[in-house]
């Protein structure tokens, strides 16, 4: 029989798992094209420990790199913008897969972290390039983004108040009645998958379509109230924190608890957030004034990934590239940390005292306020009857107060968000949760002209308050900022969440009610 090629290389340990990953090597699923390569690299590292000749291994790897480059295209430089784009593709792999192929070799962790991230120098270079683009654009022109057509289609020829009109309640979930629901959140880039956590110790995962909406599953396991949770980028994993001093990792597909991780300090866990680029890393804040970076693959805290605040840590938020972390405590301070993408180490950078002795209950970050200029901003709730809008003025997370809006919040842990899409109407909107006293009648009149090419395209946002209503603010207007108001809750509204196309809005309250509002179709 004719020889068909050179003898096959000895198969490394674990080779039988390759077909599982090889199934992703199809043009139909380009987002998984690096899955096989990464798994293969892991097996090669394991095989290298068997003591093969280093020169032979280098020659083999060089040949293999050429073959892979021919098959998939050349690999980009780690610090290039294409590398940053590719890192987003890599992060689209499921979190469970990343946990599965995790390698505890610290050298491989560093290399992997570097490949997944963009360097701080290139981050600054991108900002400089953005400024050049803004300076050189024609008057009245806009900066194109991936959501431009979506927001243009939604806006049409309507004003802000008309564009954010709601037809009423789409559905009411009451499975957590009698216990507060501090957090409600739609899954990433999903219109109909919603989760909420409760102080009864459980988390509900709900499906809104097809009708009627249903509770798909209830995640139980915490012995005390669930204070916060977060979706992974691929929505296959939920991370939750609880007053029982544990963090749990859940598989959303079947509701099983993958791992229970105790707090390193044995304290109540009050908030959590995924690192936006590397979902293997989750940051948690606890009742002993500490923030910890936790590796959910190993269940251990990252070396150098801990820092102490002045009070109990109640709120956490990353900027979109994942380089800066802000943390707020119950003493009125907001700290910024520089996050090392390769190691997970935190470096304390700046501290801002928002209001001495007042709890920082929510921090929401956004890179763009308008399409005309990149304007990194934070929304902060601070229990001082105001919603605060801060501008991020440098690469260390320094904050400068830009504007404030009156809301009712002096006691409850209210949260606020920026709307996911930018409006093609004049103005940018934030929402607040409020009540009967602050009806906002007359304030919500929107005087925007009809859309034309010179009309600013700006962002909208939503927030919570203690007077039982949901409010929308145009954050670019100093007066008459209220755009819309939703009434229907019977307790303080604690959190709000838009789905990805803003067709549905969910809000939760201190009485355990979750209301899903349907936006009017134009």
Image: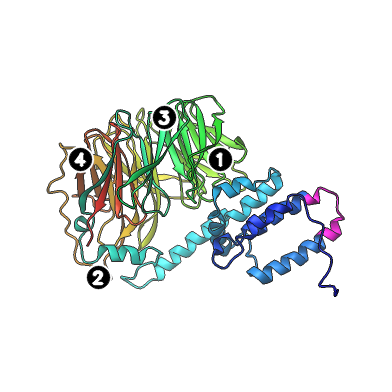
Mark 4 is surrounded, within 10 Å at the Cα level, by few (under 14), some (14 to 19) or many (20 or more) other residues, namely few
Residue mark closest to the camera, 2 vs 3: 3
Which quadrant of the rendered structure holds the N terminus?
bottom right
- Tell how many labels: 4
Residue corresponding to mark 3? 201
**Residue at figure coordinates x 57%, y 54% from the top left:** 117
Q: Position of residue 288 (x, y in %)?
A: 49, 25
**1 or 3: tag closer to the N-terminus:** 3
Q: Looking at the picture, tell me which residue is in the foreground, 262 or 358.
A: 262
Write down the region rendered in magenta.
47-57
Nearer the observer: mark 4 or 2; the answer is 4
Residue 151: image x %, image y %?
A: 32, 62
Image quadrant in which you'd find residue 306? top right
In this picture, residue 381 sits left or right of residue 300? left
Regarding residue 242, the answer to whether it shows in the image is yes
CA–CA distance in space, label 1 to label 3: 33 Å
Task: Report the residue marked by disc 2.
Answer: 452
For disc 4, the marked residue is 488
Q: Badge 1: few (under 14), some or many (20 or more) residues near its Cα, within 10 Å?
A: some
Secondary structure beneath disc 3?
loop
Can residue 341 be seen here? The reply is no
C-alpha distance separating marks 2 and 3: 50 Å
Circle 3 Cα neighbour tier, 10 Å, few/some/many (<14 / 14–19 / ≥20): many
Picture residue at 32% right of the left edge, 71% below the top: 139
- The x, y position of residue 509, in whole percent, is 29, 35
Q: In whole angstroms, how far apart are the C-alphas of marks 1 and 4?
A: 44 Å
> Where does label 1 land, which residue?
347
Decide: few, some or many residues near mark 2? Use Cα within 10 Å; few <14, some 14-19, many ≥20: few
Give the spatial CA distance, label 4 vs label 2: 35 Å
The CA distance from mark 4 to mark 3 is 25 Å
Q: Position of residue 46 (x, y in %)?
A: 76, 49
Q: Secondary structure at mark 1?
A: strand
């Amino acid at each position: 029989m004719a020889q068909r090629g050179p003898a096959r290389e000895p198969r490394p340990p674990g080779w039988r798992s390759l077909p599982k990953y090889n199934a992703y090597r199809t043009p139909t699923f380009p987002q998984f094209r690096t899955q096989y390569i990464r798994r293969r690299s892991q097996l090669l590292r394991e095989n290298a420990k068997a003591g093969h000749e280093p020169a032979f291994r280098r020659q083999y790897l060089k040949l293999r790199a050429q073959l892979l480059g021919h098959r998939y295209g050349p690999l980009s430089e780690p610090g290039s913008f294409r590398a940053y784009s590719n890192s987003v593709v890599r992060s689209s792999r499921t979190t469970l897969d990343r946990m599965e192929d995790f390698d505890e070799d610290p050298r491989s962790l560093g290399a992997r972290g570097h490949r997944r991230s963009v360097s701080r120098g290139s981050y600054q270079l991108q900002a400089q390039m953005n400024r050049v683009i803004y300076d050189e654009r024609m008057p009245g022109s806009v900066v194109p983004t991936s959501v431009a057509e979506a927001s243009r289609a939604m806006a049409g020829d309507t004003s802000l108040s008309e564009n954010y009109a709601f037809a009423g309640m789409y559905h009411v979930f009451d499975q957590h009645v009698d216990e507060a629901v501090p957090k409600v959140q739609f899954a990433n880039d999903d219109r109909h998958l919603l989760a909420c956590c409760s102080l009864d110790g459980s988390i509900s995962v709900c499906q809104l379509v097809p009708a009627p909406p249903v509770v798909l599953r209830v995640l139980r396991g915490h012995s005390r109230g669930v204070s916060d949770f977060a979706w992974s980028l691929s929505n296959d994993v939920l991370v939750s924190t609880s007053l029982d001093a544990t963090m749990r990792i859940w598989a959303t597909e079947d509701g099983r608890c993958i791992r229970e991780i105790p707090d390193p300090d044995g304290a109540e866990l009050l908030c959590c957030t995924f690192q936006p680029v590397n979902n293997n890393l989750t940051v948690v804040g606890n009742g002993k004034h500490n923030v910890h970076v936790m590796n959910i693959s190993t269940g251990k805290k990252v070396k150098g990934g801990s820092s102490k605040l002045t009070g109990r840590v109640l709120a956490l938020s990353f900027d979109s590239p994942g380089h800066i972390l802000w943390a707020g405590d119950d003493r009125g301070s907001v700290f910024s940390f520089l996050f090392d993408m390769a190691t997970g180490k935190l470096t304390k950078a700046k501290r801002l005292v928002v209001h001495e002795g007042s709890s920082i209950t929510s921090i929401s970050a956004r890179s763009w306020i308008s399409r005309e200029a990149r304007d990194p901003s934070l929304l902060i709730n601070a229990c001082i009857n105001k919603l605060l809008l801060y501008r991020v003025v440098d690469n260390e997370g320094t904050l400068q107060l830009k504007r404030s809006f009156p809301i009712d919040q002096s006691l409850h842990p209210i949260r606020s968000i920026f709307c996911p899409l930018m409006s093609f109407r004049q103005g940018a909107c934030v929402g607040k949760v409020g009540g009967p006293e602050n009806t906002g009648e007359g304030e919500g009149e929107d005087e925007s002209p009809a859309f034309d090419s010179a009309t600013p395209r700006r962002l909208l946002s939503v927030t919570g308050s203690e007077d039982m209503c949901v409010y929308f603010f145009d954050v670019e207007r100093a007066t008459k900022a209220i755009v819309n108001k939703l009434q229907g809750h019977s307790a303080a509204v604690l959190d709000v969440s838009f789905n990805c196309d803003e067709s549905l809005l969910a809000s939760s309250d201190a009485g355990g009610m979750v209301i899903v509002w349907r936006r009017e179709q134009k």
